[in-house]
Amino acid sequence: MNAPLDVLWLQSGGCGGCSMSLLCADTPDFPALLADAGLRLLWHPSLSRASGDEVTALLDEIANGRRPLDVLVVEGALLRGPNGSGRFHLLAGTGVPMISWVRRLAAQARHVVAVGSCAAWGGVTAGGANPTEACGLQYEDELAGGLLGAGFRAAGGLPVVNIAGCPTHPGWVLETLMALADGSLAAADLDALQRPRFYADQLVHHGCTRNEYYEFKASAERPSDLGCMMEHLGCKGTQAHADCNTRLWNGEGSCTRGGYACISCTEPGFQEPGHAFDSTPKLAGIPIGLPTDMPKAWFVALSSLAKSATPRRVKQNAVADHVVVPPAIRRTRK
């Protein structure tokens, strides 16, 4: 049996929501899940008992190369301000900027993992005028670079693995760490933005329960309506890379199933779309953000044809908060 994978988890500029999400992993015994997966949590600021000098000593040992580290996990954006000094976020008890600790620890780690869109791209923490100079570990929004630089590769050969999401699904985090533990995560298993492909090669649109409405372009007009939320309510499920509607949250839900438009939180820059999250920007009545891989002319033609063929049931249900016209009963055998 392989030795457990030692994981050090640090939190920087963020809300801690990805750690909260992790605790919702589908298991009655979270510590046992980690142990069975071959993962050993060296330290986590919220889940570990150790604090103060004990933690500082651990970090020193790793940073100075006296203790090996398998995985450095960072949650939250890296705060480089003011003026690149990093002094907006000092690691408690050390007086040393967190960004300095992360640089030193990343240089020693076999793998480096960004958990959440803040750690991956800067996320919400980098919004607005970004006074804290927040960035991701290896990206600043969609531009490669970030704190560690575009050319960074961990000792194991991989770039920073970006488990983007706001928050991340616990399954994405655990499956990534498990794949690192058994040595089955290679560069080819990451997409162009360094996200694990097992979830990033999917779209939120896949498995959406509103797909019949999408097919007929039967659109919701209010947040409580059953129809597709793409045309009027800002939903980006046809563009967002994630498996939220096939790998449900807490085993049963997703944003769209809860009646909320997908805001594309796994993508760089999601926090500032340039419009209200619950409205769809249009040009000449056509949504600007079209489904991935679909040329505008195709969308216009398909939309026009679909709307002309929309069944009465779908059209009426799309603008209601419950099914008002049930499907007709027909014989399914001849």
Image (tube, rainbow, N blue to C red):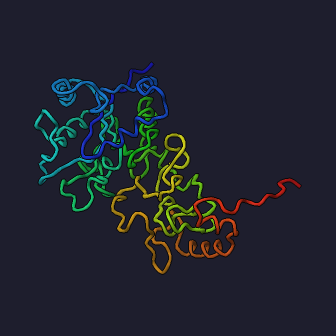
Could you tell me if residue 223 is visible in this image? yes
Residue plotted at (12% across, 52% down): 82
Establish if 141 lies above or below 20. Answer: below
Q: Position of residue 80 (x, y in %)?
A: 17, 50
Q: Position of residue 123 (x, y in %)?
A: 31, 53
Residue plotted at (19% across, 43% down): 99
Could you tell me if residue 151 is visible in this image? no
Give left or right: position of 287 versus 310: left
Residue plotted at (61% across, 63% down): 213
Where, by quadrant of the figure, is residue 133 drawn?
A: bottom left
Point out the residue furthest to the top here. 1
Please state the total of marks drawn on the protein image: 0
Establish if 265 lies above or below 290. Answer: above
Where, by quadrant of the figure, is residue 265 drawn?
A: bottom left
Q: Position of residue 281 (x, y in %)?
A: 43, 72
Establish if 109 lies above or below 208. Answer: above
Point out the residue furthest to the bottom here. 284
Residue plotted at (48% across, 72% down): 287
Establish if 239 lies above or below 38. Answer: below
Of residues 291 and 264, which is closer to you in this image? 264
Quadrant that contains the N terminus: top left
Of residues 150 and 266, which is closer to you in this image? 266
Point out the residue furthest to the right here. 334
Quadrant that contains the C terminus: bottom right
Give left or right: position of 262 versus 144: right
